[in-house]
Amino acid sequence: MNEGSAPREPKIAVIGGGTGSFTLLSALKDHTSKIAALVNMADDGGSTGVLRDELGALPPGDVRQCLVALSESPKVRDLFNYRFTEGTFNGHAFGNLLLSALEKVSGSFGEAVETASEILNIKGMVIPATLDDVRLRMEWPNDEKLTLHGERVIDEHYFKKDPRTAQLSLVPVAKANPLAIRAINDADIVVIAPGDLYTSLGPLLIIDEINQALQSTSAVVVYVSNLVTKRGQTEGFTVSDHAAEIERFAAAPILDYVLYNEQKPTSVLAEAYREKENAYVVEIDEDTMDKQHYHAVGGNFLGAMANGAEGSEALPVAKRSLIRHDPDAAARAIIDIFEHEYGQRH
């Protein structure tokens, strides 16, 4: 590559579901149109759980969030995210209802997602990891009595034993969506988004064809580490502990880079997290990460509200809430990795 020439538009596959994927996709779409969101399909809580139980539909919630993140139509995006607050549809997001209706009309959740993608005018693709009707199971092999069934149950559970000794599985065994495998194989960078290890990322990574594709792809694989721990599940987990669980699910050392946050939230917000959720900022264990096969890259990745932006102190914690990634900073770091790797290879 000639000095000063710009790399081509990167092909990026983002793995996850929920808020973590939404955050990254919202910013990455400003850097490339060749983006694919691979979405966890084990959700069975909230509006999604009701639609699964009552209609036999596949879970629309995380798919809806990714579609909205990639949408180029603000008004339709707002419509998809609108959540009813009363009546028969109380608690349901309009986009969830529409996706389930489209699935019923077409007979295919894959076609439903394609139609919704057209309605929302999205940049890139949203790809369900599997089109099978699956439920998540978590079990500790040495304790026959300790088995948890369902994403919602697992998400809300306070683990009595170390989750790192547990096994995640999908029931029945899931077959990967061929589009998901193609997206991984074609990507320049595969990004594993931040998210709940055991209910958002694990259910996708344990699908055999997906972890095999991650092991064989020529893409650079990047994990954007979580910012805070989760009460009763990842308490005490460091950055390297999170990365180790990602690779345990994938059954191989698949990571090339781990991005982690070096900033600290305001003391007020950190204390609010401790009091309300017993959650703590993930500890940075540089000495351990330095010994790993991946490159650990720190950065200033806290979102403005968590970092104490001007005016945010005047808002109640529930409004300024949340320790979140700065999507632009995280996306820029991912693009920097692409440009570095592309330069090395060319």
Image (cartoon, rainbow, N blue to C red):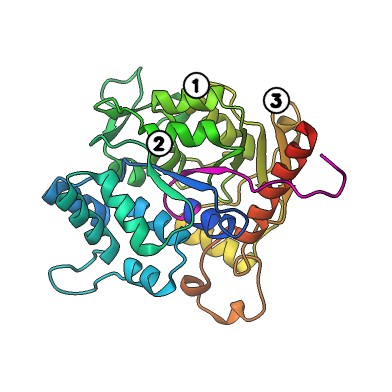
Q: Residues within 10 Å of mark 2 (few under 14, many from 20)?
A: some
**Side of 180 relative to 99 (left or right):** right
Which of these two is toward me, 283 or 80? 80
Which residue does the image show at 70% across and 26% down from the upper left? 292
Secondary structure mainly formed by the magenta segment: loop
Residue at screen point 25% across, 45% down:
109
Q: Is residue 313 above or below residue 28?
A: below
**Residue at position x 64%, y 62% in the image:** 265
Marks 3 and 2, the one that precedes in the sequence: 2
Q: Position of residue 26 (x, y in %)?
A: 53, 60
Q: Judge whether residue 288 is colored magenta.
A: no
Q: Circles 1 and 2: CB distance less than 8 Å? A: no
Name the quadrant containing residue 323. Answer: bottom right
Q: Which residue is mark 3?
A: 293
Q: Which dot marks residue 179?
A: 2
Of pointers 1 and 2, the one earlier in the residue sequence: 2
Tag 1 residue: 251
In the image, the segment drawn in magenta is: 1-20
Q: Amino acid at mark 3?
A: His
